[in-house]
Amino acid sequence: MTMPIDADARRAVAPVICYPVETLPASDMAQYGRARETLTKVDKVLVAPRDARCFTVPAGHFFRITSVEGPQVGDLNLWAQHDLSERFYSGKTRALHGTHITTGQRMWSSFPTLRPMATLTHDTLDWYGIDDFGGSVHDVIGTRCDPYTNQLLSGGQYHHCCHSNLIRALADHQGISYAEAEPFVHDVLNVFMCTGFTRDTGQYFMKASPVRPGDYLEFFAEIDLLGALSACPGGDCSSKHSADTAACYPLLVEVFAPASGTLDGWQSPQPNGYDRSHGG
C-alpha cells in the first residue's frame, strides 16, 4: 500500500461533534433533586442471576438498579408501557451523549417518537470516569450477549444469554410467546458494565466492573415505562459471558414515588415534532 504524501495532514484534520447537544430540551435536575429527597418506595423486583424480570414505572416516578450481593452487571431494556414499538434507542443515545452515560443524561426512544424515556438522576460510579485503557461504565455500545453470536463463535447452545433472558421475561409479563416477544427485545444499556474499544485494533472490550454491593444507578421515568433487566451470565464481566462459569449475583430494582407537589410544572415529553412527511 502506498501512503499519500499528505497522509499526516489528512489525519490532523480536527474532528467535529456530530450532534451538539446544547439545544436539546433541558432536564430540570434541580427539581428532580428536590423530588429525590421525598421518595417513598412503592415496588421492588429482585432479578436472579442469569435471569431477567420485568417491572413498570409510572411517569414521574424514579427507579434504581442496585448491586446487592456481589459485583454484577445488568442489561436493561425499556419500552413505552402501552406501546412496545416505542423502545430504547441505544444508537441515538450514544450519538447524542457518548459511548457511556451518567447523571444528567437521558435514554432516548426509537423513531418516530424520539423523546426522552428516562433521565439518569444518580450514579454512585460516576467517580470512575475513563480509565487508562479507555474503559468506562454504563455503556450504550454493546448490544447484549446473545445465543446466536455464541453459537457462531463456540458452536454451543446456551440459553441464559441476556437476549434470551429478556425474551423470557417480556413473554411472561405480556402473556405472549417467545417468538412474539423476541422482535421487541433491543440493544441495551449495559448497567455497571465496564467497556471500551482497544486502541490498537478498535475492538470492543470488557473488564471487571468496579461495582460493589450498595452501588446503584437511578433513573427518572419521563414516560410510563415497562422495563426488563437481565443479570448477565458474565457476572462482573471480568473474563467470560454466555456461560455458567462466572460468579453471578442478583440485582435489585426499586421503584419510588415522589411526594405530591414536588414535580409541579413538570410535563411528560411529547413525541417528536417532526411531521413525518419525508419530503413527499
Image (tube, rainbow, N blue to C red):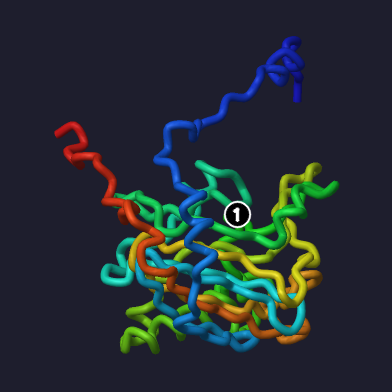
Q: Is residue 169 above or below residue 9?
A: below
Q: Could you tell me residue 238's position as x and y percent?
A: 80, 69
Q: Could you tell me residue 276's position as x and y percent?
A: 20, 42
Q: Is residue 257 above or below residue 30?
A: below
Q: Quadrant of the N terminus?
A: top right
The residue that appears at 76% across and 19% down in the rendered structure is: 3
In this view of the protein, which residue sits in the foreground, 180 or 103? 103
Q: Is residue 53 above or below residue 207?
A: below
| Residue placed under numbered mark 1 in the picture | 141
Q: Could you tell me residue 256's position as x and y percent?
A: 48, 74
Q: Confirm whether residue 19 shows in the render.
A: no
> On the rendered structure, is 183 left or right of 158?
left
The residue that appears at 39% across and 89% down in the rendered structure is: 172
Q: Is residue 145 above or below residue 87?
A: below
In this view of the protein, which residue sits in the foreground, 19 or 43? 43
> On the rendered structure, is 94 left or right of 275?
right
Q: Could you tell me residue 50's position as x and y percent?
A: 63, 85
Amino acid type at circle 1 is Ile
For mark 1, give the secondary structure.
Answer: loop
The residue most toward the left is 280
Q: Quadrant of residue 8?
A: top right
Q: Quadrant of the C terminus?
A: top left
Q: Confirm whether residue 258 shows in the render.
A: yes
In this view of the protein, which residue sits in the foreground, 126 or 228? 126
> On the rendered structure, is 134 left or right of 80?
right
Report crowding for label 1: few under 14, some 14 to 19, many 20 or more residues within 10 A (C-alpha): many
The residue that appears at 76% across and 20% down in the rendered structure is: 2
